[in-house]
Image (cartoon, rainbow, N blue to C red):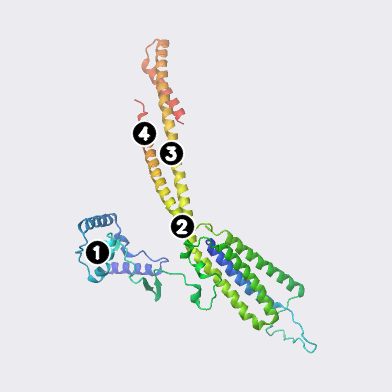
Amino acid sequence: MADPNEAQEIQDMDQITSTWPRPPPFYKDFTADNLARLADLKRERAETSNPPSNPSTTDPTTNNKNQDDDALLSQRLTGLPPNLRNLQPPLPPDEGAWRIFGDPYRLVQPLPKLEEGGEIRPVVASGGLLVDGERDDKHFDRATVLKRIAKSLLLNFLELVGILGQNAMDAAEKVKDIRDLFYNFHHLINEYRPHQARESLIATMQAQLDRLRAETTAIRDGKEKVERMLEGLGSLKIDQEDAAAAAAVATTAATDKGATGRGMGELEDEMWGSLVDSAV
Amino acid sequence: MGDRLTQLQDAVDELAQQFVACIHYVHRHHNLETLGPNDEIRVLPKDAEQEVDSHPAEAFKAAQVELAQDLITKEQQIEYLISILPGLDNSERDQERNIKELEDELKLAEAQHQQAIQEKKDIMSNLDEVIRSIRRP
């Protein structure tokens, strides 16, 4: 009884001291057999309960709430045997909010509006700023606005230095201006992030497409090369056979000794040698 | 190095830091002047904390010029970063259409790829056969 305990302790120690956390214990459930069984079950369930009578026996709390979801995503099964339960991911939280280590998180994270901060004055009219409005407002020239703000920042700093030189008491207003400009700049950039994400996606897909095409042509090239070689080999073989026949006739005629067996052997060696040469 | 937007944001933050640094430098290293005939510059004892650590006039001037130049350089960097932001000419709808097209093309290319692999396999088995058939009787 001492040995397993010790082993357990050592394992616990490992868990505490290892740099990275261990994978969650249910990774062992993801076997090929289990996955196949889950697929089978899904198919079965889809066939049997296509009319949405869901007689699955599970705890009512999840079942009631998720019944609509189940009807929608028929992929999600309830009442699975315990060893298959971990194979399908848990549902996202119902309220779209959850807590980890006491901090609240939300599924949807809308970009807070500039005006919500209270005292920040937006530089651009908020209609043109909205990300959703971008669809209609294609000509909203973000780059120009950003460049203008950048120039304004420099100008405002110059003014701030001037004011500080004259009367430092009046500087607070200017500092506020500069702060607002910075906030506006960052806000405009953050609004642009979804756009950039889509742009990155396009770039990645394009790269993937190029790579795939290059690979395909490379494979085709290789295939054609081998085909040509095979064709060459075929014609060469016939030539050799002709030559061999001719040579065989010649040798038998020339030697007149009828040592055909030996002659054939030599010829074969010759043939083999030339074949290997041509193949190389 | 992050993406361009992050680079731009970092650059803007750096500009803000440079603003602060400029003011701090001028505030800390300017010289002292008398404003009227009755003023006099009080000399603090050496070991006490100096309120102002005056730099020589030329050094101060040079530093000011350098700081100003740095500000301009940073601003130009920002403008450059703005001008190379990805997809400035594309609207959201363009992007969506683009993505859809790429998706279709990818599927097509993937099918062609699989086909090519299959052809390659066939030819390989062909070659194998030929190689095996070449043997001494």
Label 2 close to label 4 by CB (< 8 Å): no
Marks 1 and 4, how far apart in space?
51 Å
- Report crowding for label 3: few under 14, some 14 to 19, many 20 or more residues within 10 A (C-alpha): some
- Report crowding for label 4: few under 14, some 14 to 19, many 20 or more residues within 10 A (C-alpha): some
| Residue at which label 2 appears | B93
The amino acid at mark 4 is Asn
Marks 2 and 3, how far apart in space?
36 Å
Q: Where is residue A54 in the image (x, y as percent from the top left)?
A: 21, 63
Marks 2 and 4, how far apart in space?
49 Å
Residue at 40 percent of width and 24 percent of height: A237
The amino acid at mark 1 is Thr
Comparing A31 with A18, the one in front is A31
Secondary element type, mark 2? helix
Q: Position of residue A264 (x, y in %)?
A: 38, 19
**Rendering quarter of residue B64:** bottom right
Quadrant of the image containing the N terminus of chain A? bottom left
**Rendering quarter of residue A4:** bottom left
Secondary element type, mark 3? helix
Tell which tag, 1 or 4, sits nearer the viewer.
1
Tell which tag, 2 or 3, sits nearer the viewer.
2
Q: Residue A78 carries which label?
A: 1
Label 4 close to label 3 by CB (< 8 Å): no
Q: In this view, does B65 lie to the left or right of A243?
A: right
Label 2 close to label 3 by CB (< 8 Å): no
| Residue at which label 3 appears | A220
Q: Residue A275 carries which label?
A: none
Visible in this render: residue A18? yes
